[in-house]
Structure formats: C-alpha cells, structure tokens
Image (tube, grey):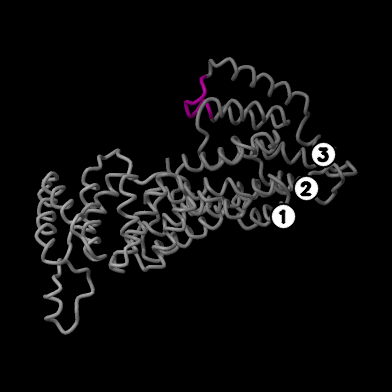
Amino acid sequence: MNTRKTLPRAAFAAALIATTSSIAVVMPAEAKKKEEAPAGPKVSPEIRNSVVAAQAALTAKDFATAETNIAAVEAAAKTDDERYFGQVLRLQLEANKLGPTSTDAPLTPMIDALIANPSTPKTELGRFTYMRANISYNAKQYPAALAGYQRAKELGYTTPNLPLQLARAKILNGDPSGGAADLEAMVAAEKAAGRKPDEDLYKYTITALQKTTDVAATQRWTRDWLYAYPTQKNWHTAIFVFGFQGANQKLITKRERVDLFRLLRATGSLAGEQEYLEYADLAVEIGVATESQSVIKDGKASGKLAATNANVARISADAASQLAKEGSAAAQEKTAAASPNGLSAAGTGDFYLGNNNYPKAIEMYKLALAKGGDKVNVDEVNTHLGIAYLQSGDKASAKAAFALVKNGLRAQIAQLWTTWADAPGAPTA
C-alpha cells in the first residue's frame, strides 16, 4: 500500500483515463424507440459526430484533432447531458497531457463541473468525487480531502485505496487516533483474508501515533509490527525511537537507558561500535562493572569493537577498578541481608544480573522487594526481576513482574520487554 504524502500524478491520470474512456452516445430518437429510456446522458444529432470523433482522436492520442472536436461539443452543448459529454471529454484530454511529475490541479475545474452537473451518472459521481479528494490531498488541503473521501464512500464508490486515503486524511487533519482506528480495521481485514499487511502500513501508523498521547495504541501497533516483521533492524528501530530519540531522550535516566541497551542485546540488535561503547560505559557508571566487561567481550567477539580502541581500554580499566572495590559476591549478600531496607539487596541483584547469574539475581530482587524502604525503586526492581526471569527462561514469571511496573517511562520499558517475552521467535538478521 502506498503511504506516501502525495499521490503519484501519472497513476492518477492513468486511473482517470481508464475509468472515463468509454462514453455511450445515445441519441434521443434511439431512446424513444425503447420501452425504457437509457439512464445515461443523451446527445443531439448536431454534436454526436463531434463526440465520436473526439473519442477516436483521444484513443489515437491525436490531441490536436481531439481539441477541435471537444471545443465543438462545448460550443454546441445546450443541455446538461450534452455539457456532460463536453466536460468528460475535456477531462480526458487534459489528463492525457499531464506529465509524470505534473501537478493534477489543472483537472480541478473539469472535475468540479462534472460533480455539479446533474446529468453525471450516479455510478460516476463517486469516482469523480474521489478524484477531486485526491487533488485536495496532494495540495495538502486535508479538510477538503477528508470531506471528499467521506462523500465518495457515501456515494458507494469502492477502490482498494479509499480506506487508506480516508485514514491518512484523518491523521493529517489532526485525528491520528481516528485514522489509526481505520488502519487497524484494514489490517484486521487483510489478516482475515489470509494476506500479510504491508509493513509500511505499520510504520506509517506508528509514526502518527507517536505524535499523540495514546501510549497503549502506540505499543500495540509496535508489538504487531515487530511480530509481523521480526527483524533485528526493526527491533533496533523500535527501541531506539522510543528511548534514544525525541522527547524521551531528554527524560530517560541512565539506568533506564541501560535497560534498553539490555533489550537491544537480548534481541541481537546492538548495531555497532558506538552502541557497544555507550552501553559498556553506562554499565560502569551505574555500578554493574561485570556487565560492562561482558558487553565489551561480546563486542570484540562480534567484530564490532576493536581491541585497540582507546575507549575500550579506558572503560575496561574503569570496570576493573570498580570490581576491585566492590568486594566478593558473598560479602555483598551478607550486607544485603543485614540491611534494614532493600536497597543493598537491589544493588546485589544488579551485580548478579550483570554477571548473568539469574537465579541469584532473582533471589536478591525478591529480598529487596520484601525488605522495601523509601529508597527502593520498586518499579526498577520489578523491571530487573522480570529481565532476570526472562533470561533464565521463566517467561510467565517475567511477564508477571513486568506487569507490576506501573509508572512513567519504566512502565513503557517493561511493556517493550513484555513484547519481547511474547515474541514468536528470535529476530532475523
């Protein structure tokens, strides 16, 4: 499906010509011979020959001859029926003249005249209304475009692009939620018909929803996109757009950022040297030096980090220095057990999480939650508990922990992790 901001002019003209290329010329005398007069417009003998000649010239792409005969029809037309023939022939001629990159605005007067003409067949009125809406859309006149698409639908006009154009016009007219709802219905219809919805449809809708406050809808569309098109690149895009760009980039904390890096790592979508370095550096900053060392090791193994990189050496030295000061894991556990609150236990859980010792991490996070205390960030602990459960293979417990995260960006981070927990399989490269 085409989700571009404007409709291609050449395609527009081709569709226009194809759908108005056959005009049934009926003479009044012929109509009287039948029990029922034809419903279509009729022409007098005076202009019939000009209409037929214009049609033949258009078919042959002899535009000079077509112009002469169309002008004759326009000059001689005395009824709405005859004016209809002049208008539709003029429309065909001008549409034929449009180049691939030409604006479709010159067609506006002819289409407006056909819409206003009471002799325009009802079967064609919806088509012309849709075409006029497309012109408004291309001119970024979105209120007029939306009204036109809605009117075309009311007139019974059907084309595969109409639902999409309606949705896009709603979004661009300031109703992204309404447009997204229409697109969601389109996706459901595609799936019901056994077809896979186009990926651009997901991307377009997600981009529109990100400009709203409808976080739930954005998350739902992101989830469906990642499940339909589960590539490492798409996972990287979803995570990066959420936490590393836009407004959230200014709000997210270092600790939350590390949890997103963890998700990038889990989905195999860490993209390159800079991301490995930032992840490893932040891990040291928030006190999980073992995780920093593990990230650097992975980066080297993947070929995305050069051992000779000066930043690798600096971060590695910082991590080693931090580990030397932390003491043994047993000592940290002893301190956590003796502490009156859960802060030390949460820190020890992070130590084990960074060291990939998930059973111990789970034990410490549970202790942190049990001890509690004002300084314990319950949402963060539940996020990390969920990560530890998921990395250990206990998806049900992971989702239960993520579901307890209720506030701010942490809740959205937990939802992203839940999306990963429910993913139908590993992302493809």
Question: Which residue has dot 1 on it?
Answer: 404
Q: Say which mark, if any, is on residue 378.
A: 2
Q: Say which mark, if any, is on residue 344.
A: 3
Judging from the image, what secondary structure is the residue with disc 2 in? helix
Q: Position of residue 106 (x, y in %)?
A: 31, 45
How far separated are the C-alphas under marks 2 and 3?
A: 13 Å
Picture quadrant of residue 196? bottom left
Q: Position of residue 265 (x, y in %)?
A: 56, 38
- Report the front residue among 241 and 166: 166
How far separated are the C-alphas under marks 1 and 2?
A: 9 Å
Picture quadrant of residue 47? bottom left
The mark nearer the N terminus, 2 or 3, is: 3
Q: Residue at x 74, y 48 (%)?
A: 379
The mark nearer the N terminus, 1 or 2, is: 2
The mark nearer the N terminus, 1 or 3, is: 3
- Magenta-tinted stretch: 299-306
**Within-10-Å neighbours for mark 1: few <14, some 14–19, many 20+:** some
How far separated are the C-alphas under marks 1 and 3?
A: 21 Å
Q: Position of residue 426 (x, y in %)?
A: 48, 47
**Tag 3: residue type?**
Ser
